[in-house]
Every structure is written in structure tokens, then in C-alpha cells.
Amino acid sequence: MPLSTDNPLLHGFGPSVRTMWLTADSLEVKRTWNPPSASTDSSPSAGAEALSWISGVARLERAKLAIIGNENSAASTLKLILTGNSQEDIASEWREIVQNRGDWFAEIAPGTSDLHRAELIQFARNIYERFDDSPPNVSIYHDQRDRENNVEEGWTVVCQLSAALLETIVADIYLKRCQALEFRYSIAPTLIDHWLAPHSVDATYGVLPLGKGTDGTCHGYVTGVSWRTSGTVNTEAVHGREFAADSGPDTGPETGQLATQESSPVVLEIARLSRTVRLGFIVVFLLISALVILR
């Protein structure tokens, strides 16, 4: 059943092909250790490893997120959580989500039973069936404020990178060589209020009220991660790093390449002084030549 763009339950949103861009800063590396579930020994020697993850504040570029039908939920800032997992772990976690999610589509326009609701539910169901074949590594969801559980209202994006890529970022953060990250995401369904608009036009991503325990959620894939590093051991030059994130089996951060080096501030200052000295010699030479000609 195709989704018509004039479906009133979409509140003006429509399907679109648009990449989501996020910039994240205030990055913090955290570690978590849990004892093995099959062991009562709570010491680190029991076999479980301390896991690293990264928290931060992410901001959408020229865009906002909003639950369709709830304008008050619109925001461009999200809480960021980065973890490192293998494709097998991502697939296993997704299977658990599928088993526990119940009827994710029950909250889509509850109380209505017309053709428009059936059309929208089938549209969402088709997308999530495809996720079962290729589990997503990005989850975006909105929470209402819950004082009892210390949950603040707002959006959260959880991104599962490969373990190798996460450890590379963690190392650069520890060395103070990484202050900000840039992400490219593709989410599904991608519903935009200006669904024919180019990336240069501000837009709002509409999120369906799916899931259990949240106001709304959507999933997708991270298609790229990039960051700038500085303060390397042997040079003050600034580098650009970009990695193609895992989008499926047999892909990984090894495809990343370092960008061209830029000149450091010290090198630029030396070059400026050199140009100034050369210019001074030229001016003096021209003045002497003029005096000789006048004589």
C-alpha cells in the first residue's frame, strides 16, 4: 500500500530522501563494567571487560526533529550516546528489540480506524520488516520528563559504531585531539515537512509515535563519521579524519583516509615574516635604483 502525501495523519510531512547531518561536542569518555550474567563473581577477573562509550551533545544542521502531530516536541539538540559493537551484537540487540517491542504501531493515530491510519501503519510496518533483514545501528527517540527515574524530556540519538572505530575516537579524545564529531545518518522512514526542499533549506524531520516506553522513535544507519585532530606528537599541523561507518558485514573503518594536511599557525607566521622581509628588500632596492637614475 503506497503512502499518499496528502494523508491527513502526516500533518503536512511527506516521504523524502535526505541525509541527516549532526555535529556533536561536549564529548566525554565513560566506562562501564558489568559482571558476567552467568557468574556470581563480581570481580573484574570474572571475565567481563570494562566497556567504553561516549556521551555528548549533538545538534542538527539546518533541521529539527518533531513527533508528527506534536509541535511542542520540535528541537534541534539531542543527547548523544556512542557505543562500539560488532555486526553480530547489533543484530542480536535488534532481535531483542523486536521481541519486546509489542505492537509498535498501536500509537499511530489511536482512536481512528480509517483508511488513512491503515495506510500509515502498513507503510511503517514495511520499513521495519526490512530492518529485520538489515538491523539498524542508529536509534533516535523522544522521552517525556520522568522525575522518578531522573529522565529529562528531550531527544536522544544512540549510534553503534564498530569497536575499532570507537576506540580510535576514544584515543583522540583522551589525547585532546578531538573536540567535535560530525555524523551523516539515513533514517527510516524519512518524513520531512518540506519534503521536496534541498539541504540548503531548513526542514523538520517528522518522527512517528512508534515504540514502547517512548513518545516516538525512528531508526536508521550511520553513513559517515568525521572529526578534526590537532596537537600530534611530531607536528602542529591540523588533520581531517573521515571514516565510512559500518553499514553492513565486511565494511569497517579501515576505508577511512586522512585528508591533506593544513599549515600550522607557527608555519604560517614564519611564512608571513619571510614575505615581509622579501618585500622590504625589494622596496630598498627600488629606492636605490631610483636615486641612481635621478643622479
Image: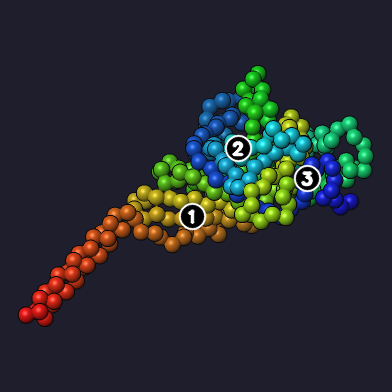
Please state, as top left, top right, bottom left or bottom right, where the C terminus lies in the image.
bottom left
In the visual, does 205 lie left or right of 238?
A: right
Lower position in the chain sequence, tag 2 or tag 1: 2
Please rate how many residues cluster around mark 2, counting C-alpha atoms within 10 Å: few if below 14, some from 14 to 19, many from 20: many
Write down the residue under mark 2.
78
Instruction: Report the front residue among 157 and 244.
Output: 157
**Contact, CB < 8 Å: mark 1 with mark 3?**
no
Q: Quadrant of residue 140?
A: top right
Residue 99, percent from left and from top: 79, 36
The colour scheme used to paint the residues is rainbow
Examine the rendered structure and indicate whether residue 289 appears above or below residue 276. Answer: below
x, y (%) of residue 208? Answer: 76, 40
Q: Position of residue 243 (x, y in %)?
A: 54, 55
Q: Which residue is mark 1?
A: 241
In the image, residue 249 sits, relative to residue 42, either above or below, namely: below
- Cα distance in 3D space between marks 2 and 3: 23 Å
Residue at 53% in and 37% down:
56
Q: Which residue is mark 3?
A: 12
* Residue 217 seen: no
Residue type (three-letter) at the residue carrying disc 3 = Gly
The answer, for residue 266, to whether it is visible in the render is yes
Residue 104 percent location from the top left of the image: 80, 36
